[in-house]
Amino acid sequence: MLTQYYGSERERASFVTSLFDGAARHYDWVGHLLAFGSGPYYRQRTLAHAGLRPAMKLLDVATGTGQVARAATRILGDPRGVVGLDPSVGMLREARKVHSGPLVRGRAEEIPVRDEVFDMLSMGFALRHVATLEIAFAEYRRVLKPGGRVLLLEVSRPQSAVIRWAIRVYFQQVLPLIIRIGTGSRDARLLMKYYWDTIDECVPPAMILAALRQTGFIEVQHRVVGGCLSEYVAVKPLPGGTAT
């Protein structure tokens, strides 16, 4: 709970959705600044490394403007194999401009699809906005086929004080100035401030790993890239408790 932004869990969901709705048309431009232009390559490489292959079906939770969905489509070769899910109408509107596959409005904690549909589920840099990890992960397990994989990409609070200081300055001072000049969007500037606060107060990796195991995932792995990018991979067991 970040009480400087909202006072209750109900207000949290409304605040986050409204914030992303307001910043949606600037989100890709801001994301390009965040990743220094490396985002598309990083997402595609990470999806392939996690096991995404042609003919699979992927659910991209919190798809936003469709950045992960686009990377997945380049691997699958068919946009119909990638379903994007997001609670923000504004984000889905932007995603529709670049992704011709199915787009669904919904939240991680209540996914409006039937059981055991997808070979893989991805979530790119949005886990910090989930209210209850166990509820979301139980939904992820439900919609995955036996042997299906989940890939979570997240920005974790850096252990290094130097890296933490550098990221804080970038998010709180450099990016808001660039965004003010480039877009004039108050929502986009607020989004960067909110991003840093969610990173600084985020759930530690050990709790995320424990929640994945608690909800029945196996082969749970955590990899850190660049001191602050976390990649979580886990597998839904086959009947009998085994992996693929």
Image (cartoon, helix red, strand yellow):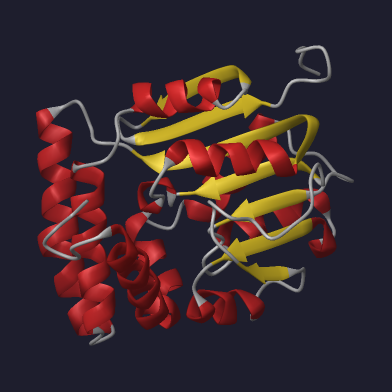
What quarter of the picture does the C terminus occupy? top right
Q: Nearer the viewer, residue 32 or 54?
A: 54
Residue 75, position as x, y percentages in the image: 76, 48
Residue 212, position as x, y percentages in the image: 52, 27
Residue 44, position as x, y percentages in the image: 63, 46
Can residue 45 be seen from the camera position used here?
Answer: no
Q: Name the residue located 20 percent from the left edge and 65 percent from the top edge.
A: 6
**Count of residue discs:** 0
Residue 104 quadrant: bottom right
Q: Name the residue located 72 percent from the left edge and 60 percent from the top edge.
A: 83
Q: Name the residue located 53 percent from the left edge and 79 percent from the top edge.
A: 89
Report the residue that reaches farthest toward the right: 55
- Rendered view: 126 above or below 157: below
196 displayed left or right of 165: right
87 displayed left or right of 235: left
- Rendered view: 25 above or below 231: below
Q: Nearer the viewer, residue 37 or 140?
A: 140
Q: Nearer the viewer, residue 210 or 34?
A: 210
122 displayed left or right of 179: right
- Rendered view: 9 above or below 146: below
